[in-house]
């Protein structure tokens, strides 16, 4: 009798404990978007005083890795064999999703407004949908595909492709490289890796990215220029170390950790579209801190992108 009762008693308990809470995943995704959204204005304030994008990213991810490393060591508890088994995931996360993506984004910010550069980067969510489709061999829900089309239409308005003053081609190219890095971030972060905690993936990935950037800077492949002049934000002069600290602690450590945690609970497709909220936060922060505001047609495009996000979310919930 005990044997017959055990499955009925124990199985529901395990199911309840293992089931992720989508509300917490959504909150973490929105918090990630807000944290990432601060990076553009703070980085641009440094770029305008003579910093290179490589130096900004190096200090950003290197500082974040140092902050998260003690927590990663504690989470692994000596199980370093896990890192060896998950080496391809850590490599892709650190080299593409962290290093390449951030360098490309900051190079785009040098030639475009923060809002336009970010919208280019987030076109990478379409790559996430395509990757999920190819890997699962299961077509997305019709509402998901409609959301992708609407979001792309909004992106075209943001870029003002038919306008009189289209964005700089080099800036657009860098933005598309950042889009690829973003897709790798969400796909990699959502991988089923119960043996590799989110904090360990974030810390090790950013640590690897920092090492690679440091080597590229040492051999002068990647320019590394720093400046000690005060930066200007919201009309006020601030010391240079303040935006560096914000980029490392908020826009990197908190953002990548929360983003990895959210992606594992929401899945790569939904998490990447929830991450589009970063554009709204970035436009808000760029307006408050830098006085940048997109043109009306670009604001309309932003609204369409948000509507596309809602459609994708609804389509994935229906399919689920």
Image (cartoon, rainbow, N blue to C red):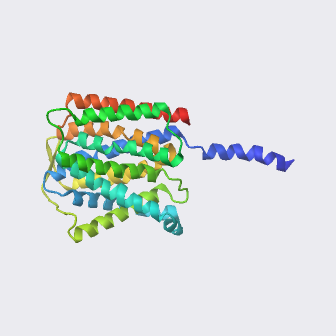
Residue 271 in picture, x, y percent from top left: 44, 42
| Residue 300 shown left or right of residue 194 in the figure | left
| Residue 268 shown left or right of residue 36 in the figure | right
Q: Quadrant of residue 211?
A: bottom left
Residue 160 in picture, x, y percent from top left: 21, 34
- Looking at the image, the residue that sits furthest to the right is 1
Q: Is residue 9 above or below residue 47?
A: above
Which residue is at the front of the view, 273 or 172? Answer: 172
Q: How many marks?
A: 0
Residue 41 in picture, x, y percent from top left: 22, 45
Q: Residue at x 35, y 52 (%)?
A: 181
Evaluate whether residue 176 shows in this view.
yes
Q: Residue at x 84, y 49 (%)?
A: 2
Evaluate whether residue 31 shows in this view.
no
Residue 197 in picture, x, y percent from top left: 50, 57
Q: Is residue 60 above or below residue 135?
A: below
- Specify the quadrant that holds the C terminus: top right
Which residue is at the front of the view, 108 or 287? Answer: 108
Q: Residue at x 14, y 33 (%)?
A: 164
Which residue is at the front of the view, 37 or 152? Answer: 152
| Residue 14 shown left or right of residue 309 in the figure | right
Q: Residue at x 42, y 45 (%)?
A: 128
């Amino acid at each position: 009798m005990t044997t017959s009762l055990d499955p009925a008693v124990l199985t529901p308990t395990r199911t309840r404990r293992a089931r992720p809470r989508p509300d917490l995943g959504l909150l973490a995704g929105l918090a990630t978007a807000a944290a990432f959204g601060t990076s553009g204005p703070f980085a641009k304030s440094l770029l305008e005083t003579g910093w290179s994008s490589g130096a900004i990213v190096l200090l950003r991810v290197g500082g974040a890795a140092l902050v998260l490393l003690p927590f990663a060591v504690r989470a692994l508890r000596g199980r370093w064999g896990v890192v060896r088994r998950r080496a391809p995931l850590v490599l892709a996360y650190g080299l593409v999703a962290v290093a390449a993506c951030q360098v490309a984004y900051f190079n785009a910010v040098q030639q475009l407004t923060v809002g336009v550069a970010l919208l280019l980067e987030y076109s990478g969510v379409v790559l996430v949908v395509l990757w999920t489709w190819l890997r699962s061999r299961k077509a997305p829900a019709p509402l998901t595909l409609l959301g992708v089309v609407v979001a792309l239409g909004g992106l075209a308005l943001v870029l003002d492709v038919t306008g009189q003053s289209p964005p700089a081609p080099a800036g657009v190219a860098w933005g598309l490289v950042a889009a690829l890095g973003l897709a790798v971030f969400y796909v990699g972060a959502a991988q089923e890796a119960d043996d590799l905690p989110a904090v360990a993936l974030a810390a090790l990935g950013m640590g690897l990215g920092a090492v690679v950037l440091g080597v590229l800077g040492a051999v002068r492949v990647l320019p590394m220029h720093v400046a000690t002049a005060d930066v200007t934000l919201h009309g006020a002069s601030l010391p240079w170390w303040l935006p560096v600290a914000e980029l490392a602690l908020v826009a990197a450590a908190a953002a990548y950790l929360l983003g990895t945690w959210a992606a594992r609970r929401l899945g790569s497709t939904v998490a990447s579209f929830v991450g589009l909220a970063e554009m709204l936060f970035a436009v808000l922060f760029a307006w408050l801190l830098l006085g940048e505001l997109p043109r009306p047609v670009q604001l309309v495009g932003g609204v369409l992108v948000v509507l596309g996000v809602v459609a994708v979310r609804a389509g994935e919930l229906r399919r689920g």
